[in-house]
Amino acid sequence: QVQLVESGGGLVQPGGSLRLSCAASGSIFSIGAMGWHRQAPGKERELVAHITSDSSTVYADSVKGRFTISRDNAKNTVYLQMNNLKPEDTAVYYCKVHSSYGSSWYVNWGQGTQVTVSS
């Protein structure tokens, strides 16, 4: 089993910043791609940002230039630096981590952390 512990969510004013973290632990041989998704009330879960094992990145158009995804392979941790936050960024943010154990790969989801952007 793999445990993902997310932190860093909260309430912030428009234009503010937050940094999310997601640390993976447990039955892990290696970590592959890592990413962040979000789900706003009444909407489907959507990709925010994705980073591969060789640190190639992909961003949703709505966050390009404002959010930065990074990873620390030594700590099995993925980060999401969110700047210039907007009210429409309000959502529950979930980390997603691909991990291997033995010859199998697994997709693991965090429990979610609330981000609220409001004045």
Image (cartoon, helix red, strand yellow):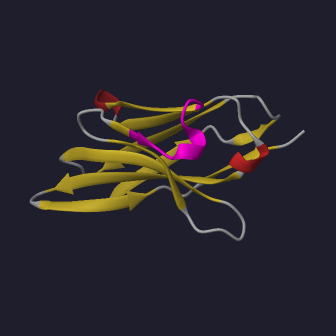
In which quadrant is the C terminus drawn?
top right
Q: Residue at x 59, y 68 (%)?
A: 44
Q: Horizontal and vertical percent for residue 41?
A: 72, 66
* Up-down relation of residue 96 to residue 63 (above or below): below
Q: Is residue 63 magenta?
A: yes
Taking the view exactly as shown, the residue that stands out farthest to the front is 61
Residue 27 seen in the figure: no
Question: Relative to residue 84, is residue 95 depicted above or below?
Answer: below
Looking at the image, residue 89 sits to the left or right of residue 19; the answer is right
Q: Nearer the viewer, residue 33 or 73?
A: 33
Residue found at the far right of this picture: 119
Left/right of residue 40 with respect to residue 52 in the rendered view? right
Q: Which range of residues does the magenta coloring cover?
A: 58-66
Q: In the rendered image, which quarter is residue 106 located in?
A: bottom left
Question: Is residue 15 visible in this depiction of the protein?
Answer: yes
Asked if residue 57 is among those painted magenta in the image, a careful observer would answer no
At a point 17% along the width and 56% down the height, the residue shown is 101
Q: Position of residue 57 (x, y in %)?
A: 36, 37
- x then y, percent, for residue 76: 33, 37
If the image is split into quadrants, where does the N terminus sit? Answer: bottom left
In this view, the residue in front, 77 or 64, is 64
Percent of width and height locating residue 25 = 35, 46
Residue drawn at x 68%, y 61% is 40
